[in-house]
Each structure stands twice: as C-alpha cells, then as structure tokens.
Image: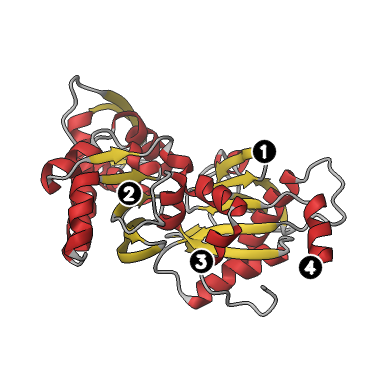
C-alpha cells in the first residue's frame, strides 16, 4: 500500500476509451490529451511501427505491399492483440513523454462494450498490463458515457443512454449504479460508412474508399430532412470503365443510404424499452434519452428517434468524449469505480 501511494506520486492515472474508430486518453489533472484514430501502420518486413493514430490513418488504402495500416479493434473488441498492445504502449509512452518515468506504471480505467466476453476482457487487461499499466479496471462503455454526461446514475431513477460508436451501438437503461436492461448491436459508424459504399456501388457503379464514405457521412449524412439541400463530391473508381470519376450527391440520397441502419438503431431502442420495468420507463418518458458517441452527431438523429419513440431525445455535450470523460471521473471516485468496474479476469489485478 505504501509502495502504491509512492508510485501514485510519480504517475498520473489514465482513462482510455479504446474505440473501434478512435482512441481517447484522459490523464488525471490534465484532461483529454490524446484523441487519435485506432490505426497502426506496420512495416511487415521488419515488424517495426511506422506510425500510430492520425499519421497511420492517412496511410489507409495508400500503402505499398510491405506496409500494412491495421485497425486492431473490430466491433469494439480487440481483433489483433499484438498491434493493440503496441498502440496502447505508444499512447501511454506519449502521456509520459519527457517525464521521469522509471516508476511510470499508471492505474488505467478502460471502457469496454456491454457484450464483451471473458476472453475479450482478458485480452484488454493483458494488453494494458503489457503496455505498462500497474492496475487495470474495465468499465462498461454506456456506464462510463452516462457518468461522462453527468447523469444521476447512483439514484433510483431510470437513465437511458444510447452510445453510438464506430463498431457498436450500446443501448442501456441505468439505475442505482447498475445496468438494468441493455442491447449491444453491430450497427454504428463503420456500418454507416459501408452503407454509403454499397449505395454508391449499386446506384452509380462507383467504388468508394472508406475514408471518402466517412467524409460524405460527416458532411451531409442525416436521419431527417434538412432545411436546405446539402451536397458533397463523391469520388471513386468507375466500375465500368475502371477510371476515376466524381459525382455530386445530396443529403436525400445519403439519407436513403443510411435509412436501414438508422431504423435498426431505433428498433433496438424500442426493444430495450419493451423489457424495461415500467417504473423506469416512466422516468425515461419524463427525462428523455441521451445520445453519446460519434454517431450522435448524425444530423437529425435525435429528432428521428424522438418522432418515432414519442420521447424527448438529447445529444450529449461533446458526445465524442463522453466515455473517456466518464473514465476520468471514475479515476477520482475510487468508491464508484469499485462498485461498477467489471470483475477482473487477471490474477495480477487487485
């Protein structure tokens, strides 16, 4: 215990939102200092890391044969353990950059999906320990997001949060520091990018890259009709001629492309409410649903959900950082962290 307290003086505990699309890192007393894509570029001849985060994302789809730009997380869980470990190590070293770090082994709080398996939990813990963590605590992402949104999760009140990330959408009803009912679906930001790619292929015989599809989604993607027509350039390869081609698309077309995914998210919100105790449903009807995660930024999504569910829907303030802000809050509240952290799968965790 004395050694732990001594270590605590040298290290800054960190919270991590280990996302499919982006990894965010919160450092105690410093706030969010890293928000970068979950991408690692590796030289396959030497095994050497060429780039991590923003620099690696620029390389996607543009690398020669011996360099691979890898996304080590798929649908919210680790799909490539070694690369995830290297990525975490890189971010933890970046946190300690230029500081005395002989003892720099931080306590780490990491958000994980609701339906994560024991094997997947162990993979996250092991990767964090190998990257230099002293203690690792795993917290369910919707719970971390709800805390980051400052919802009164400790009270006997129904709080409904929909966290739409890159790989998964997590729908949860929280009361008394626990998840009462929930659903986790693989329809989220990356699936929406695929919807746009598929739409371009079937409607225009145009093959798009994922980055172009994502840019179009961010620029003109919507779930409800917009006040003015939005347009964007769609550039790709013509599947008939094999040559580059550019067309202009509008928000109505992209809304059509995204409609199935939006409907699936709304259907799962309804299904979650149908299994929620009536007392909590009454609270949610009065207090509304909170949207967090990057997907919450899709124009008009809150209105589309509210229109069908007949319940108020609010987009969290800075929804992209809700989960990592929640992990940061938990670093400072040891009692709440112990209450809501997932049981550890590792022998070396306290």
Going 19% across and 19% down the picture, which residue do you hit? 228
Q: Secondary structure at mark 1?
A: loop
The answer to whether any part of residue 226 appears in the image is yes
On-image quarter of the N terminus: bottom right
Question: Tag 1 or tag 3, which sits nearer the N-term?
Answer: 1
Q: Secondary structure at mark 4?
A: loop
Q: Are marks 3 and 2 in contact (CB under 8 Å)?
A: no
Question: Tag 2 or tag 1, which sits nearer the N-term?
Answer: 1
4 vs 2, front mark: 4
Q: Are marks 4 and 2 in contact (CB under 8 Å)?
A: no
**Residue pointed to by mark 2:** 194
Question: Tag 2 or tag 4, which sits nearer the N-term?
Answer: 4
Residue 261 in the image: above or below residue 122: above
Report, in whole angstroms, how far the alpha carbon at label 1 lies from the one at label 4. 25 Å
Question: Tag 2 or tag 3, which sits nearer the N-term?
Answer: 2
Q: Secondary structure at mark 2?
A: helix
Residue 227: mark = none
Residue 339: mark = 3
Residue 1: mark = 4
> Foreground residue, 171 or 283?
283
Going 16% across and 45% down the picture, which residue do you hit? 311
The answer to whether any part of residue 205 appears in the image is no
Residue 156: image location, x then y, percent: 32, 59
Q: Secondary structure at mark 3?
A: helix
**Residue pointed to by mark 1:** 30
Question: Tag 4 or tag 1, which sits nearer the N-term?
Answer: 4
Residue 202 in the image: above or below residue 156: above
On-image quarter of the C terminus: bottom right
1 vs 4, front mark: 4
């Amino acid at each position: 215990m004395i050694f732990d307290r001594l270590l605590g003086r040298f290290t800054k505990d960190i919270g991590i939102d280990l996302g499919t699309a982006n990894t965010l890192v919160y450092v105690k007393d410093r706030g969010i200092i890293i928000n970068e894509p979950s991408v690692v570029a590796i030289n396959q001849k030497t095994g050497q890391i060429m780039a991590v985060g923003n620099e690696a994302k620029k390389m996607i789809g543009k690398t020669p044969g011996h360099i691979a730009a890898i996304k080590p997380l798929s649908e919210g869980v680790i799909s490539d353990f070694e690369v995830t470990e290297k990525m975490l190590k890189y971010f933890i070293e970046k946190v300690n950059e230029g500081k005395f770090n002989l003892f720099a082994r931080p306590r780490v709080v990491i958000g994980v999906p609701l339906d994560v398996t024991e094997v997947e939990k162990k993979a996250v813990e092991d990767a964090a320990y190998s990257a230099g963590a002293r203690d690792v605590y795993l917290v369910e992402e919707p719970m971390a997001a709800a805390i980051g949104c400052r919802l009164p999760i400790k009270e006997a009140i129904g709080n409904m949060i929909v966290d739409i990330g890159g790989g998964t959408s997590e729908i949860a009803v929280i009361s008394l520091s626990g998840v009462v009912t929930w659903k986790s679906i693989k329809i989220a930001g990356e699936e929406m990018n695929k919807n746009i790619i598929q739409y371009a292929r079937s409607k225009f015989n145009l093959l798009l890259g994922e980055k172009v599809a994502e840019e179009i989604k961010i620029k003109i993607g919507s779930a409800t009709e917009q006040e003015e027509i939005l347009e964007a350039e769609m550039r790709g390869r013509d599947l008939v001629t094999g040559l580059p081609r550019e067309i202009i698309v509008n928000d109505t077309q992209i809304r059509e492309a995204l409609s199935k995914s939006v409907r699936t998210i709304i259907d799962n919100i309804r299904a979650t409410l149908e299994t929620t105790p009536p007392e909590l449903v009454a609270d949610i009807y009065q207090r509304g649903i909170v949207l967090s995660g990057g997907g919450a930024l899709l124009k008009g999504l809150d209105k589309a959900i509210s229109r069908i569910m007949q319940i108020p829907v609010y987009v969290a303030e800075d929804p992209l950082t809700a989960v990592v802000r929640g992990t940061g809050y938990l670093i400072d509240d040891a009692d709440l962290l112990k209450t809501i952290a997932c049981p550890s799968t590792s022998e070396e965790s306290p």
